[in-house]
Structures are given as structure tokens and as C-alpha cells.
Image (cartoon, rainbow, N blue to C red):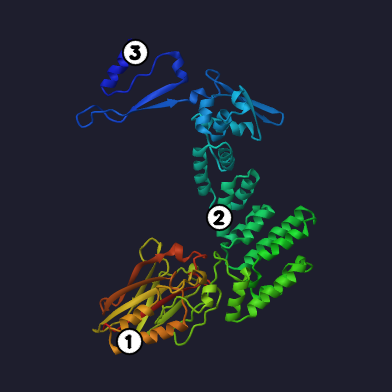
Amino acid sequence: MSSLVRRTRRRLDEGCSAPRAEDENAQHAESTCEKTLSSFSEEAPEHQLQLRVDIECLFDQEPLSDVQLVVVSGPERRRFRCHKVILASMSTYFHALFTGGMQESQQREIELHGVEPECFEQVLRLLYGKAVQITPNNLLTFMHLADFYGVPQLLERTEKLVEQLVTVRSRNCCAKLVEATELRCTQAQHHCLSVLRQDLAAAIKQEAFVQLEATVMGDVLAHDELLCPHEEVVLEGLMTWWRAQDEAMEGSRPQPLLDHLLPLVRWPLLSTETLSLVEQQYPELRANPRVSDLLLEGFRFNSADAQGKGELRKKNVRCNGRKGMLLLAPLLPDGPWEGPVPSPVAHSDAADGEGCQMLLSYVWNIPHFASLTCLSMYSPTFTVNGHKWKIYVYPKGNNNHHKQLSIYLDSGIVDTGQLQCTFKLAVINYNINSCKRGGSGAAGGADDAQKADQSTAADARRVSMERRVNTERRVNMDSSVVKESQHQFNRRAKDWGFREFMPLEKLEDPQAGFLNEDAITIGVYLDLSGG
């Protein structure tokens, strides 16, 4: 037994890692031994050892190399000395190449085409465990090669990096989509398309938007979950792209392509004003034979009543709002609700006469909310059950680092009186598409009616009136933020509410549905029956 083996065994018995061999050949295949326990004991009578083989030093080295890969790119030929077992263990492509019984499995030299030598070298370095620098400029190339050569670890990592690099805020989805399309990198294409659909209005402003392929443009326009404020943005995007193609092709763009893309715009969702000005705003559409029929379709839908629009939605998909489109109901009127509040029928659910309702004692619209600089502000005074109240708001938050909207109810009590009150405060969401059937955010409704059967006659009459009013006033409470509290108001505690009512980031998000005509709406419902 050699002295090296004896020393190694002795060190293992003592719970130490084995020394590395001093042999010169060991530099080509170093190995380390990692121990997970410091020493043997009765509680841990076994040692778990793990050997980690270091193969970095084998990259492009002649010793033990059994295959040479020659990367051909035009006149350039780059040769790499490799090891089949390493390539096959890391890449499904090379595993199939070397074990599938093909001619290449017996060859000592294999030519590879369709890849740049520099890029292939970087992938090889990764397969041999070497560190490689990935940048935004070469990320999609690595992702494409990981997919082509079947390197799962690299593909998974690059997918995560693409998700971090391409976001709505980064404003680069179009450029990366063009690059991914050229590389035929499917995973990156799907992600970039998903990001583009989340904010079409922002994507149109990106320089690379007009470079999208016609098939990609068609996919964007046809998608049901395209997110944009209104359909006018979709038409603007199409025409911006189309005009750029005309300039690039010097007027030789094929007319059938436009004929195919125009019906993907949902013309019935365009406003009557837009429909009237389409040919004036886009003169190139005047000679298009499809436009007259599409305009007629839009005017017919806009002029129909609620029932007629419902029938048209069932027959024509273009009459239905996109699931990702932000469709806002009109602002509720300021002050107490004294009569029905009209709500447009802009979604198939709403067409059935059902919606999310809530009875509000007072409604307060705050205009130009996002640009407010004041510390706090009061609503106008309103009266409930003979007592005067106000809503008190901190637009940028009350001592919460400008992260949360703060809302309070002010009783205005200055004498020795007191009021016991249960109240709800709400920030209204106007997104019609997010209003669900039979929403649970309503004050009043079937649950209240059931409770009223077990309550006093006066309570039953109150609930019955609430239910009747709610059927006339449709408010989206499923997506609205509603908070309830109880308080005994008096001179020393005349106001009560919520320092952290809702995140300002969510409130000021233009796609969330809380901002409507640059205003937000705060509603309050007061129940003074407990007093």
C-alpha cells in the first residue's frame, strides 16, 4: 500500500478531506472532497462525502480528447478539441449525436454550421464549467443556443434573465421581440409578446415597433387580452406600423396585407367621433374597399340600444371588448345619490342587467389626483340623518413614507355629544371588464334581505330600499377597495379612518381603473342605527 493511500485513509478516519495527489497528470482532472460532518460520533456514526470533479482545465485540451468540433461560418473555420462524455452529459443535442447510431458518432471530426464560432466557444466554456459573461446584448443568443443544443440548465437560467430584462417598465419589448424573431428563439418571443400586450400604447412609442414582422403584428392585433386604454390605440398602432412599411418598401407594400390586418381592429369599439374622422386622419384608407364595411359595422353598433348591442356581441367577436382592455364607466356624480346613475353597457356581462352594486351615502370626486401637492384636503360637507360629516384625505399618505393613501371620516363634533357609527369607505374602481356577475362587495342584496327577515320591520324596510336603489345604480365593487370600521365619535375623537387605506402605486396605476379622467372617487356609507 503506497504512503499516499495510507495518509489518505488516515485523514478520512479522522474526518478530514483527502489530500490532492502530487502527480503532474492530476492537473487535468482535479477533484475535491467535501465533508458534511466535522467528526464521527455516536449520534452521527456515518460520514457523507461528495466528490466534485473539476473539468474546466480540460476545455480545448488535447489529452483525453476524443472528438474535434469544427465550426464553419463562411470562410472561417474554428476547431475545438472536446470530450464526448462531457458534451453528451450536458447537451441533449450531442447526446443524440454521439449515441444515436448516426455516422457522426464514429467520426473524430464533426462540422457544425449555422453558428458563429465566438458564440459556440462561449457555450462550450459553459459546458466545461467555465464562467461566461452574459450581457443584454448577447442574452438572446445564449438562450437560442441553449434551446438548439438542448442545455436545460442554461435555458432555464436565460429564461429567468429575459424575464428580468424585458418588462413593461424597461420599454424594450419590441427591440427584443425583433431580435428573438430573427433568432427564432420561441421562448423569448412568447415573453416579449406577453409584455407588449400589457401596454400597447407604450409599445407603439418604441422605435423598434415598426420593425415587427407582419405575422407578429397580426398576432398582436388579434389577441383578446391586449391591454390598452381604448381601441383607438389599436388602430393607431396598425397605421403607424403600416406607414413605416410603406416608407421602407417605397410604396410597394402588398395591399392584401392591409386587407388582412384591418378587420383585426375592433371597429365597433371605436367611438362615433373616431369613426367619422378615420378617412380624414388616415387618407390611405379612403381607397380601401374594406373600410366602408368596417365603418358601417362600427356606426351600427354605436347607434344600437343596450339590447341591440347585446345581440351584436353574440354574433360578432369584434363587438366584444378585449379582456385586457381598460373600459371605464363614467364618473359618478358628486354628492349624495338622489337618483339612478346611468352605466354604459360596454361588456357582455353588463348587458344582462347584472352588476356589482353598493349604496353610498356620499360620493366625492377628487380631480387631478396624481398631480396634487397638498398635504391633506377635506370633502364638501354632507348630511346623513341630520348630522354633518366630511371625508378627510391625505393624497400622499399620512406618515407612511408616501406609500399609502390615508382616508378618514370626520364627524365635526365640537360639543359634548357623541355618535356611534358603523361606516364603510371605498375608492371606486371604474374598470367595467373587472366587474363580475353577482359581486360580493355590495352593501345590501340577498344577504341583507335574509338578515332582514329576522330583524325589525324598520330594518327590513331600510334594507328593501337599499336593494331597490342598488338595482338602479351599478358600481364595480369587486375591484374597488372597501374598508369598514366602527367608532364612537365625540369631541376628543371626532375623526376615524385608515392611515394605510391602499397602496398609492396601485391607485395611480393608469391601467388599474381607479383613475378616471385623472380623478379618483371616494364613497362613504354610514349606518347610524347603532346610535
Which comes sooner in the sequence, label 1 or label 3?
Answer: 3
Give the residue pinned by disc 2.
Answer: 195
Q: Nearer the viewer, residue 141 or 312?
A: 312
In the foreground, 167 or 49: 49
- Counting from the top left corner in percent of width and height, residue 217 is at 66, 57
Q: Residues within 10 Å of mark 2 (few under 14, many from 20)?
A: many
Residue at 52% x, 65% y: name it.
511
The kind of residue tagged 1 is Ala
- Please state the horizontal and vertical placement of residue 268, each as a whole percent of the image: 64, 72
Q: Which residue is mark 3?
A: 4
Give the alpha-carbon distance from disc 3 to disc 2, as whole Å: 60 Å
Residue type highlighted by circle 3: Leu
Look at the picture and state if 497 lies above or below 155: below
Closer to the chain start, of discs 2 and 1, is: 2
Q: Is residue 172 visible?
A: no
The reply to whether discs 2 and 1 touch (Cβ–Cβ < 8 Å) is: no
Q: Which residue is mark 1?
A: 460
Image coords of residue 463 (percent x, y)? 35, 84
Q: Residue at x 71, y 31 (%)?
A: 74
Which residue is at a point 54% across and 31% down the rendered structure image? 95
Q: Secondary structure at mark 2?
A: helix
Q: Given the image, on which type of amino acid does mark 2 rest?
A: Val
In the depicted structure, whether residue 29 falls above or below residue 458 = above
Taking the image as shown, residue 186 lies to the left or right of residue 73, namely: left
Q: Earlier in the sequence, mark 3 or mark 2?
A: 3
- Crowding at dot 1, Cα within 10 Å, few <14 / some 14-19 / many 20+, comes out as some
**Which residue is at a point 58% across and 63% down the rendered structure image?**
224
Q: CA distance from mark 1 to mark 3?
A: 94 Å
Q: Is residue 252 above or below residue 39?
A: below
